[in-house]
Image (spheres, helix red, strand yellow):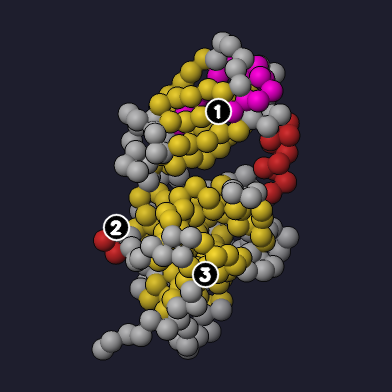
Amino acid sequence: VKAKNDHRIFIKETHADSEFFKSSNTKKKTSKKTKGFFKVPSGYKRFRLNIDFNNSYTRQLVETFHNSTTFGFDYGMESNIHQDDILALDAHWLVDGKPYLAEALPFDATLKIPLVIKLNKDSQIRIRIADIQNFESDQPIYLHDNENDSFVNLKAQDFNINLKANNYKDRFEIVFNKNSLHTTETNLDNLKVFQNNSISELKILNPNSLSLKTFSLFNATGKEVLHKKIHDSKKAYNYSTRLLSDGVYIIQINTANDKVIKKKIVISNNE
């Protein structure tokens, strides 16, 4: 049997659903389901993200939230995709620096979830919500474009864009509170953090020369892997990440007046 690519949805799921791909004309069952998908138990949140490529096929990603999960791998809650199975036009989450189709995290309104989009040719992209469960009605789910600092609430509308061929690892992310992002930047006078994987370097930009006290980096298990005391006020600080393993990290910066900024970054030394 040869499956056509027309409106194909590729799925590799958690224990709640075990479908591997789904055609757009699949009949929906109603028993214990919402919009054709199995309902998650109380205490869990979940949304499905559909990424459409040139109106040809769709990659579906799943994000599940529960307070028992971690920023590392959670057995039975997440599913990865082998590098050889990534398509020429594709999208995925990152868990410990590896591509995943289903990810699980403890929910926090300040979360930033990187969305990787890989294109081997210029493409028309549409990103849309396919399923939302147990989210408050007034809780937005934003697609944040870091390049132009724009936000689209995917609960209200789809995100459409034409992209050049590239591997977009740092441009797009899912966030839940755009105001908190801007408030943090304002309160800390535009203090910003960038991970440059091409040269394995973490850069902290401090244009107003704030007095910073410490800088720490935590891996996905919460272990502190880097700690620096900051003695001088500079406009920029650079730290090598070459010796760190690929994966997701949390950076924490403490200012002299005890303000804190946290940011999730992805380190990949193989780029």
Q: Is residue 204 left or right of residue 181?
A: left
**Residue 89: quarter of image:** bottom left
Q: Which residue is mark 2?
A: 83
Look at the image and give the residue range highlighted in magenta.
204-218
Residue 117 located within the stretch drawn in magenta: no
Q: Which residue is mark 3?
A: 124
Q: Which residue is mark 1?
A: 204
Q: Residue at x 40, y 49 (%)?
A: 95
Disc 3 residue type?
Answer: Gln
Label 3 SS: strand
Label 2 SS: helix
Q: Position of residue 261 (x, y in %)?
A: 61, 31
Quadrant showing the N terminus: bottom left
Disc 2 residue type?
Answer: Gln
Mark nearest the camera among 1 and 3 is 3
Quadrant showing the C terminus: top left
Q: Residue at x 53, y 22 (%)?
A: 237
Disc 1 residue type?
Answer: Ile
